[in-house]
Amino acid sequence: GNFHIPGLAIAFDTLGLAIAQTAFLCVVRCQKLFSPAFSGLPLQLTARGPEHSGFATVQKTLMALYNEIRHLANPASLDSAPVSEAIEDHASMAANVVAKTAAMVPNLRFLAAIELLSAAQAVDVRGLTPNAMGHGPRSAYAMVREQAAMLDEDRPLGPDIEAVEAAIRAGRLATIDLLAQ
């Protein structure tokens, strides 16, 4: 039989586009949390006022991660040419497409980690208690706070982001029962 798999390549290219859309939404939600005009929270989610950076530097990380995902989301299944002396008239590029799509996943996890840290910070800065949240958000908040404390004084956020990303990678979010009371 003929081993021709453009459908697989197209499916993974489509998944890559969906990952890029998800990444963009993550970035926008974070930017809105950082903006007093939108969120009503202090600029950059700092509890200490404008003389502190808060989450300001994280915006560069957000955009760098999104930019790489956006670059990798460019469909590769369109790049085809005859091969093997034109005996094979179409190369699906499926292996490359799957590899580039897989390369997006760690960046998306890091974006999710930043968004979770930002959301937990917003909860803390607003003075909400975990009991004011539903079970799913409360469980996600608890998972984040097990990995990283509230940003009260400026500090490098890289270790916090890495700790939350590791928890996501370990499946900690996947184990939250969203329907539990």
Image (cartoon, rainbow, N blue to C red):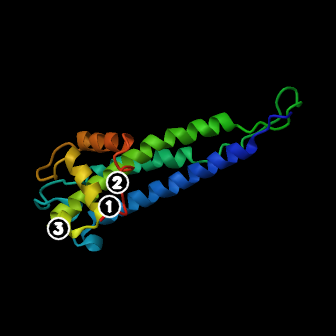
Task: Kindly state the secondary structure of the residue where label 2 is placed.
Answer: loop
The reply to whether residue 42 is visible in this rendering is no
Foreground label between 3 and 1: 1
Q: Is residue 148 left or right of residue 31?
A: left
- Nearer the observer, disc 2 or disc 3? 2
Give, as a three-letter code, the residue at label 2. Ile
From the image, tell me which residue sits under label 3. Answer: 128
Which comes before the other along the chain, label 2 or label 3? 3
Return the mark for residue 136: 1
Q: Which mark is residue 75?
A: none
- The reply to whether discs 1 and 2 touch (Cβ–Cβ < 8 Å) is yes
Residue at image coords 56%, 42%: 101
Q: What element carries label 3?
A: loop
Determine whether label 3 and label 1 are within 8 Å by CB: no
- Image coordinates of residue 36 in percent, x first then y, are 24, 69
Q: Mark 2 sits on what residue?
A: 176
The spot of residue 85 in percent (x, y) is: 88, 26
Q: Nearer the viewer, residue 176 or 78?
A: 176
Sequence-earlier tag: 1 or 2: 1
Distance from the alpha carbon under mark 3 to that under mark 1: 15 Å
